[in-house]
Amino acid sequence: MAALLDDMFFFCVDPGKVCSCIEVRFIDDIKGKGLFAKRSIKKGDTIFIERPLVSAQFLWNTLYKYKACEYCLRSLETAEENARRLSGIPGLSLPHPELCRVRPELHQGCPQCQVMYCSSECRQAAADQYHRVLCLGPSQEDPDHPINKLKDGQLAMLHSLFTTALYDDHLSRWFVPEGFRSLFALVGTNGQGIGTSSLSQWVHACDALELAAQQREQLDSFIDQLYKDIDKETGDFLNCEGSGLFLLQSSCNHSCIPNAEASFPDNNFLLHLTALSDINPGEEICISYLDCCQRDRSRHSRHKILRSNYLFVCSCPKCICEMDELDVTSEEEEEEEGEAEGETEDEMTDV
């Protein structure tokens, strides 16, 4: 088992971007394991870069024509194509198109089912790891194919279809009902939202340009207006969105005052964990399962969201300091709470 975990570790984590600075420790029977600093980490440092054990784009995201590499979730639209679709302006032209890093000439499709990848490397990696088994070939549009049925089923139906489509004697414990439920719970409670965006990456590149004052003002004004047009046409759903299960990141416990944050600056599934503050040796590295707005709410509201989505009561320093507050929810929070409880982190951190 130890050798298997070592192999998984080096598959998931870039050894050059980690790892003498952290360790995973068992804390107690309630919190389980946690991630701790072995040496001082400065604010802004990249603590590690990690690829997921498994990841996938959300089905609804695919249906709304967010195009992403089937393997690494890199956005397949150029920044200009992305901006045109999101803004609803077909003739839109972006300044500085050379800053877009998407390379359509490198994209490749599966010869059998035409699923798209951002590169030959991703197509080969997918084939080696799972796509040879999951490729639908000419059955891609067949609603009666077991894998297509998996997209719409409830848990009992999913178990039956999952077994029909993918049963393997070597993995039999995951195909019995109890094992299947455990597998879903594992991914559901430990999954990290992934957000990729060629447009966002282009905007960050524009921010880094050295321009004369007038040119900077014109570019910033263009980008501000673009986001207003996008907000009017599309709303908040800007990214190719999915979820992944990460070996190290899933060891990070929650705090309402996190000292680290996950993001996806490479416009693919590679997770960068970055320090939000200086972290001392021996200090636990915590992320937040809540978004910024939710973290500003009352202790009572934060606890309601965490209990509903993650089945625990937070005892971070902020919650301990607020223990004497009344367990009440403001009217404003009550109005928003129905939306908030479905949007925890699993949150897609913008690239």
Image (spheres, rainbow, N blue to C red):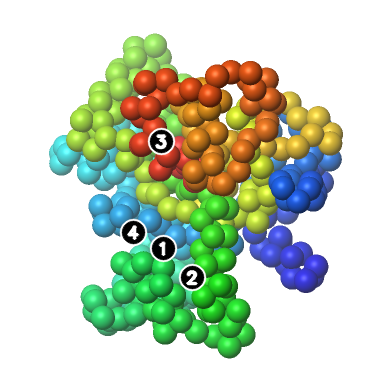
Between disc 3 and disc 4, the foreground one is 3
Query: Mark 4 falls on what kind of element?
Result: helix
Identify the residue under disc 1.
70
Give, as a three-letter code, the residue at label 3: Ala
Taking the spot 49% from the left edge, 29% from the top edge, the residue there is 301
Horizontal and vertical percent position of residue 65: 26, 54
Q: Where, quadrant-wise, is the N terminus in this rendering?
A: bottom right
Identify the residue under disc 2.
126
Identify the residue under disc 4.
59
- Asked whether disc 3 touches disc 4, contact meaning CB atoms under 8 Å apart, the reply is no
Q: Residue furthest top?
A: 213
Give, as a three-letter code, the residue at label 1: Glu
Horizontal and vertical percent position of residue 139: 28, 81
226 or 2, nearer to the observer: 2
**Mark 4 closeness class: few <14, some 14–19, many ≥20 residues within 10 Å:** few
Horizontal and vertical percent position of residue 84: 22, 41
Between disc 3 and disc 1, the foreground one is 3
Q: Relative to 195, does residue 122 appear above or below in the rendering?
A: below
Query: Mark 2 falls on what kind of element?
Result: helix
Among numbered discs 3 and 4, the one appearing first in the sequence: 4
Spatial separation of the CA atoms under disc 4 and disc 2? 18 Å
Query: Mark 3 falls on what kind of element?
Result: helix
Taking the spot 74% from the left edge, 44% from the top edge, the residue there is 35
Taking the spot 56% from the left edge, 72% from the top edge, the residue there is 178
Identify the residue under disc 3.
340
Query: Mark 1 falls on what kind of element?
Result: loop
Give, as a three-letter code, the residue at label 4: Leu
In which quadrant of the rendered view does residue 73 lie?
A: bottom left
